[in-house]
Image: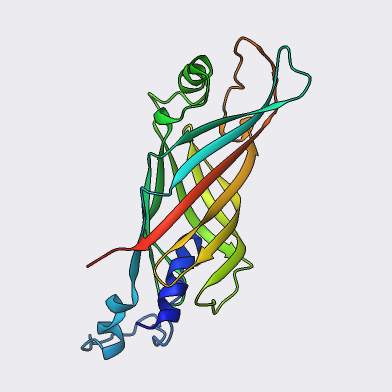
Amino acid sequence: MSLNVHVGLAVALFLGIVPSLRGAPPIHAGERHTAEPPTAAVQALDTLLTRWVLQPEGSEARYRVREQLAGFDFPNDAVGTTSAVSGSIVVTSEGAVVPDGSVFRVDLASLATDNDRRDNYVRQRTLEVEEYPEAVLVPRRFVGLPFPLPETGAVRFQLEADLTLHGVTAPTVWEIMAQVTPASITGLASTSFTFDTFGLAVPRVARVLSVADDIRLELEFRMAPESD
């Protein structure tokens, strides 16, 4: 497979377009068709699929919430992070995702900030991690991705994806900034929404006067093709 194809597959880690099959004759009601031996193109289909895997080193999920602390004249960002992220995506040589093998997961119980009291509240009262332990991201469609892609360099585009959090699935739009190399793709994906979007309770802890309604999610990622 050419270098351009591999690069295209890498950047497709956040793409959500499912390609349609072309060239198959229409089947009309009442017609009968005899099965034919698979063509060379069909037999070669598997060779056009590549699984790209999220690498533990260099990958991290974060949330950011703006809060106003007592005794401070300016707001502060509460930032929760975890490296307990996993997932992979299967893509075609045309840069389209194969949904059945493509999903990303975040272990919410491992999210931690610089304040244990805040963390306990968020886990127990906001995210309710005992009942909803994971966040799950399923890509659906990309917007503004340049194609064909350069062999190396920076790309920016948007991702439309379904996010499941706190038992609720909702569409989200992610801003993607990525750096492409022949062997990997690294970058940052980010989105934002309100607490109400996923039925989340706004945190109320000591020393926090107010919490902004917007939640920002970030995924810092490094993807590499699955080795044989």
The quadrant holding residue 63 is: top right
Question: Horizontally, is 173 left or right of 15 in the view?
Answer: right
Residue 3 is situated, as x and y percent measured from the top left of the image, at: 41, 80
Q: How many marks?
A: 0
Residue 197: give x, y in percent of width and height. Answer: 61, 35
The residue depicted at 40 percent of the width and 88 percent of the height is 25
Can residue 94 be seen at all in this image of the molecule? yes
Q: Is 8 on the left-hand or right-hand side of 191? A: left
Farthest right residue in view = 73
- Which residue lies at the image location 39% right of the left edge and 31% below the top edge? 133
Specify the quadrant that holds the C terminus: bottom left
Q: Identify the residue at image location x=51%, y=22%.
A: 122
Residue sitting nearer the eye, 73 or 123: 73
Question: Is residue 107 found left or right of 216 in the rendered image?
Answer: left
> In which quarter of the view is residue 54 placed?
bottom left
Q: Looking at the picture, does residue 97 appear above or below residue 126?
A: below
Which quarter of the figure has residue 74? top right
Percent x, y for residue 46?
Answer: 28, 75
Residue ranking furthest to the top: 206
Q: Is residue 192 above or below residue 67?
A: below
Q: Which quarter of the rendered picture does the N terminus lie within?
A: bottom left
Q: Is residue 223 placed above or below 59 in the rendered structure?
A: below
Residue 78 x/y as whole percent = 60, 28
Residue 132, visible in the rendered structure: no
